[in-house]
Image (tube, rainbow, N blue to C red):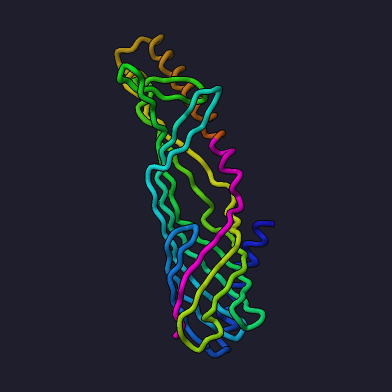
Amino acid sequence: MKRFLQLSIASSLFMTPIFASNIELQGNTVGAEVSMYGLGLNYKAKFSDYLGIRASFDKFKKSDIELTEETNGIETNYNFDLDLNDMLFIGDYHPWRGSFKLSAGMIINNSNLDGVITPKAKDDNDFEFTFNGHIYSTKEVGSVNTKVDWDPVAPYIGIGWDTSFDKDKGWGFTCDLGIAFQGSAKATYSVNYGEALKDNPDDTPIEKEAKAETRRRIKSDLDEEMNKLQDDLDDYKILPYISFGINYKF
């Protein structure tokens, strides 16, 4: 169903300019907006009393986003940096030739969510990691980098208002209320082991096996951590989209 919706919207967007090429362009609009994806700029071309095609770019960046997962009363702390870069390609249908519009299109997602699992300080000025309720010292684990990826294309449908649409020229107000079908984000990790778990040429076979077993246990616990994080991300396959802005038609 999602694939069909995505292809249908894409086809309509790419076919619209072909249809519109036989229609006189009735105005261009440029504007600025504030959306759930950040601050953005947009451009809209009006092709008839009912139809407009627009493109916009939104950007938002935030560092040091804290997230905590708890297992058996023991917390695992995440620190993320979020960098949103999204392009929207939308077709607007104005059924009554006025401000109200029905919209469909797609969001091109170039966003990044990168972070680390942060260790907790101990009373003796040492630090320790907690994975899946198990505690590891920083001598065993040096660092754990995490990453969240989204589908590159998210279909979008919504409604809104553009008060400049039926004007010959001048300032207007815009508003969009819709939903983006972005699918489930994917959580991954990479681990850098500490000095205590790095292979040493002088290690005995028993020491090598003990280190390998500890690394396997850490990997298993980290896999469980990512599964828990993934469960949280699975709740956000469909996201609301809200934006407000001003524009000028010329």
Residue 77 in which image quadrant: top left
Region in magenta: 229-250
Which quadrant of the rendered structure holds the C terminus? bottom left
Pick whichever, 12 or 102, lies toward us: 102
Q: Count all numbered tags in the image, as a single digit.
A: 0
Say above or below: 217 vs 46.
Answer: above
Q: How far across and how far down the image is residue 84, in percent?
A: 43, 55
Q: How far across and how far down the image is residue 52, in percent?
A: 56, 79
Which quadrant of the rendered structure holds the N terminus? bottom right
Say above or below: 63 vs 8.
Answer: above
Pick whichever, 179 or 200, lies toward us: 179
Pick whichever, 207 or 41, lies toward us: 41
Residue at the location (42% across, 48% down)? 82
Residue at the location (61% across, 81% down)? 98
Q: Is residue 139 left or right of residue 8?
A: left
Say above or below: 141 vs 82.
Answer: above
Residue at the location (57% across, 73% down)? 161
Per the image, is 211 magenta? no
Residue at the location (54% across, 81% down)? 165
Residue 130 in which image quadrant: top left
Q: How far across and how far down the image is residue 73, in percent?
A: 53, 23
Q: How far across and how far down the image is residue 27, in percent?
A: 49, 86
Per the image, is 240 magenta? yes
Q: Is residue 181 left or right of residue 58?
A: right
Residue 106 in which image quadrant: bottom right
